[in-house]
Image: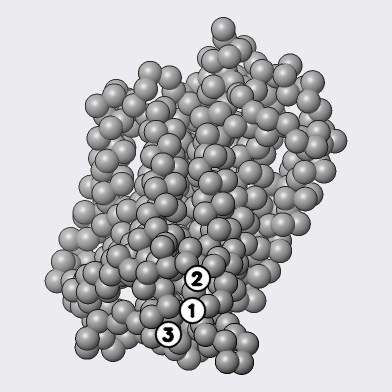
Amino acid sequence: MRDEPGFGIEMAVLAILGFGVLAYGSTSYWASAILQAAIAVLFVAWWFAAARSRPPAEFEQRQEASGWELGGVRFRASGLGIPAALFVTVIVLQMIPLPPGARYLVAPNLEARELSAETVLAQPGAPGESQSSRWRPLSIDPTATLDALLQFLAYVALFVVVYNLVDSRSRLLRMTRALVAFSFFVAFVGLLQDLSGVERVYGIKALRYGGSPYGPYVNHNHFAGLMEMMIPLTVALLLRRILRPSSGGTGTRITSQGLLLPDGDQPRGERAGQAILLGLALTVMSAAMLFSFSRGGLIALALSAGVVTVMLVIRGRLGRWQVAVVGLLLAVSVAAFLWIGPDTVVDHFRRAESVQHEPSLFTRLLVWRASVGMFEDFPVAGTGLGTYASAFLAYYPMGTEQTWREAHNDYVQLLAEVGAVGALVAAVGFFLLLVRLLGPILGRQEVKERLIYYGLCTGILSLLLHSLVDFNLQVPGNAALFVVLLAMALAQRSMLQRSRRQET
């Protein structure tokens, strides 16, 4: 019997992700606000549903992985709660007014840089009062920092819901299939827009400030960010459908054709039909990503897929047939590249760069160097989360013609905004995350639905690599999807721990 409250929450999660992507990636303030409000409502609804359907006694009886209880709701322990809480504490401290002496000790150049960036105009003092004599926060723009903090808390709430929601293999597969189907639709829309030559988003929205639209996004790199997260999952589903062995169990089920099969098996025709649909989805998504001309996205996806595949081969996680199918997919990709023609593809990339006025790697290096200068001026606590666009006004390199609201490197920008203290907390959380994700790949124990897990890890790693040269994690639609994939992967790991406890 289907868990109706849980199924409703599951559908709400998918609806929120769909809105986040289709509303131009939720980069507009109105879309981001709606996304945050929807996540808040989702969290409250999940809380009440969890309090009613999962009492504390049941949590202990099911021998869940270690967790904690609050308000009658049991939460699984992800291992990332303490770093997240410390990071929130750092951001809150950035917004607390401090006396001039304390501010000077933490950031000696703060006053001069605020005046240079003209952000002090947003915080006027009393008539005749010296700016240096007032109590003021470390953040040069507390309003922007508060907005960024609320957005981060929304991601935390979304992670908590999905991490505790995905507690069964059936739910994991259902959500994975729904995400792949949605991504296929987005890729189809992107290709259709590309082939028709329309330069407006959905053929409607004109870009007043320029851009390189593709699908629902105003930037082709952000469309590639979505595809690079979902293509590995599509490959995983395809491999699972082609190579899935018989369960060998004693359970049975009746198919729609009235055939009695061992539990987990399917008629060949049904499996073949699903494999064809998944192959079509993979083809469309791969073509859309290729013609989005995102070099960073393609390189990140290739590197992440190569790293995960090598680790799996070394650890003996992939069987001969699985390696053969992966090799076949790679061979088909290379054949498609050669059929299109390397010169044609390279010419497409060059033309895209000249038309879209995308910053070159050299320009980005100049901006990253200037951003490091921001960190040197605010080494302890940074300029404030979400303040990069304002703070960077005083650091523009000579000859820079473009407007830089992001550093095009999420890690450099984070360092400038939160300083050494916040970056240290984030680095610890990042290290713990990698340890937990790679554990089932490099360790002895395997998660259930391991192909899905490998696909999740590949997509997550790909976006983390892409963040070295872009800012996908600052696009709310992509960031929300990243959080959901991360929660799904760690939930699988939690289910592995639960099965271990039950075995002992």
Label 3 vs label 2, nearer the camera: 2
Mark 2 — residue? 100
In this view of the protein, can residue 215 be seen by the observer? no
The kind of residue on which mark 2 rests is Pro
Residue 121 visible within the image: yes
Q: Nearer the viewer, residue 92 or 277?
A: 92
Distance CA(mark 3)–CA(mark 2): 15 Å
Residues at badges 1 and 2 in contact (C-beta under 8 Å)? yes
**Circle number at residue 132:** 1
Q: Residue at 57% across / 26% down in the picture? A: 495
The amino acid beneath tag 3 is: Leu
Callout 3: few (<14), some (14-19), or many (20+) C-alpha neighbours within 10 Å?
Answer: few
Name the residue carrying label 3.
Answer: 115
339 left or right, relative to 455: left
Q: Mark 3 against mark 1, which lies toward the viewer?
A: 1
Query: Residue 11 bears which disc, if any?
Result: none
- Residue 207: percent from left, percent from top: 47, 87
User: Left or right: 40 with respect to 318?
Assistant: right
The residue type indicated by label 1 comes to: Ser
Q: Is residue 389 above or below residue 331?
A: below
For the residues marked 3 and 1, what is the alpha-carbon distance in whole angstroms?
A: 11 Å
Image coordinates of residue 398 in percent, x first then y, are: 22, 86
Mark before the other along the chain sequence, 3 or 2: 2
Horizontal and vertical percent position of residue 116: 38, 85
Quick check: marks 3 and 2 in contact, CB under 8 Å? no
